[in-house]
Image (cartoon, helix red, strand yellow):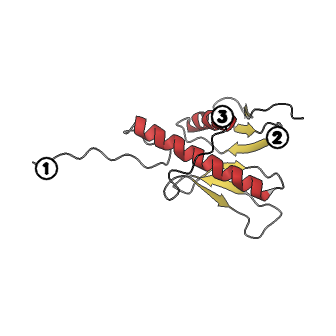
Amino acid sequence: MSPSSQWTLFLARPGRDRQHVVRDPQGEPRLLFGEDDGTRINDRLARYIVESLNAGLDPEDPDPDEGWFLDSLSDGDEQDPALLICDPDFEVRLEILDTDNFEEDQALGRRVTALINTYLLQEDSSHPSVSSSGSRTEREPSKSSV
């Protein structure tokens, strides 16, 4: 059957300008990360996504209105129906690589987006003073006006 039952992380360009690629259990590249913003968020997200996919996690998106989101560049162009995951600043951060099964690709995109938003909310709650690459920052605790 398949060579592996695990999702795997591959660094296509190791070093400072590393390129993260997540491969499905059949060894096919499925997720391609864009450039890191200097915070090494791609390193953390890639590991978290691979671990979560392997663990079978499929959370509901905890931040569908303000978090990272799935976008499509298809606009009727069935030759290249790119699925992109963007941060709240509309920067493209990941691409879902096409498998000729658009519904399966969309499902993976929604799942990965929900995993990313879950991860970022967990990070924000454990480090309230740190902004996680485009995610909203926690407000300072309100001070009494007395």
| Amino acid type, residue under disc 3 in the picture | Ala
146 sits left or right of 110 in the view: left
Quarter of the image with the N terminus is: top right
Q: Which of 120 and 56 is in front in this view?
A: 56
**Residue 132 visible in rendering:** no
> In the image as oriented, which residue stretches furthest toward the left?
146
| Residue at which label 2 appears | 28
| Residue at which label 1 appears | 145
Disc 1 from disc 3: Cα separation: 47 Å
Element type at marker 3?
helix
Q: Which of 135 and 121 is in front in this view?
A: 121
| Amino acid type, residue under disc 2 in the picture | Glu
Disc 3 from disc 2: Cα separation: 19 Å
| Residue at which label 3 appears | 55
Q: Where is residue 115 in the image (x, y as percent from the top left)?
A: 59, 44
Mark nearest the camera among 1 and 3 is 3
In the figure, residue 35 lies in which quadrant? top right
- Rendered image: mark on residue 69: none
Marks 3 and 2 close (CB-CB < 8 Å): no
Q: Where is residue 141 in the image (x, y as percent from the top left)?
A: 27, 44
| Amino acid type, residue under disc 1 in the picture | Ser
**Residue at image point 9% right, 48% down:** 146
Q: Where is residue 74 in the image (x, y as percent from the top left)?
A: 74, 65
Disc 2 from disc 1: Cα separation: 58 Å
Q: Callout 2: 10 Å neighbours few (<14), some, many (20+)? A: some
> In the image as oriented, which residue stretches furthest toward the bottom?
76
**Residue at image point 82% right, 36% down:** 27
